[in-house]
Image (cartoon, grey):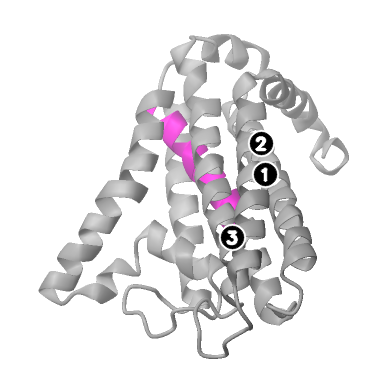
Amino acid sequence: MITIVPPDLVPSVNSEVRKVTTLPTSRFFGTVPLVVALLASIASALMAGKPDPKGEPATGAATIGLYVALAVVVVAAAVFGAIGSGAEYRHQTMPVTALFTADRDRLAAAKVLVTGGFALAAALAVEVVSVVALFAFGRGKFDFGMDLAAVLGGGLLAAVCWSVIGTGLGLLLRSSSTAVVVVLGWLVVVEPLLWLIANGVGATGFVTLFPGSATISTVAVGSFTDSDFLAPTPAAVVVLVLWTIGIGGAGWWNLRRLDL
């Protein structure tokens, strides 16, 4: 990673890498998705029957474990990003960090790059574990074709996007605990509740603009095409990227304009 970033950014990136690799939470967020990926993929592969062309998800029931693992790694990436940026304020280390990296743009860029890089690595590891488990226990129950490749690509994108969203919330709210509550509260409580309300008032199309809905469509490529709650994948990718830019940019702007 050091060789592909601008030279002026290298010290800041090195500093962020050291922070990430020494935090106990990094090992936790790196291990849990891998364990879930292994167990869920083995379970779904063993329990699934032959592929059903009309079934959901489009990649076959044997791949359900992969979707579960990707959901876990996406949430873990968001929480990881929120803790990584918000904890600087909780432990009052942000002024020291800014002292060694006076350029706030460089500081924010380093945090986003490192967090996104680790999220990408974690998601890739989860996908490798899931695919290996599928080949080992679900041979003949799924097709390794373009649909599955699109799911794997969507999973990587979603993990990186949510890591940036989490980082942006941590910088914006200046609290790791508050940022984590916002992320989990939105995904687990608020957005599902809004789905129910939208369905009740006949405004299901509005739900497609939410980040959770966009994430599902980004990952579950080709599945649930009849759902009114999910936008087509190309549009969903745009929505998710816009949320990422908006929240990540808001956190960046907050870091630049306010005193530490």
Of 147 and 60, which appears nearest the observer?
A: 60
Q: Are marks 3 and 2 in contact (CB under 8 Å)?
A: no
- Identify the residue at horizontal 82%, vertical 40% (top origin): 1
> Sequence-wise, which precedes: disc 3 or disc 2?
2
**Where is mark 3, residue-wise?**
65
Identify the disc placed on residue 30.
2
Q: Quadrant of the C terminus?
A: top left
The local crowd at label 3, few if under 14, some if 14 to 19, many if 20 or more residues have their Cα within 10 Å, is many
In the rendered structure, does residue 163 fall within the stretch colored magenta? yes
Q: Amino acid at mark 1?
A: Leu
SS for tag 2?
helix
**Where is mark 1, residue-wise?**
34
Q: Are marks 1 and 2 in contact (CB under 8 Å)?
A: yes
In the rendered structure, does residue 248 fall within the stretch colored magenta? no
Where residue 255 appears, as percent x and y from the top left, is 47, 28
Q: Quadrant of residue 101?
A: top right
Q: Amino acid at mark 2?
A: Gly
Examine the rendered structure and indicate whether residue 35 appears above or below residue 240.
above
Marks 1, 2: nearer the viewer: 1
Where residue 117 appears, as percent x and y from the top left, is 70, 42
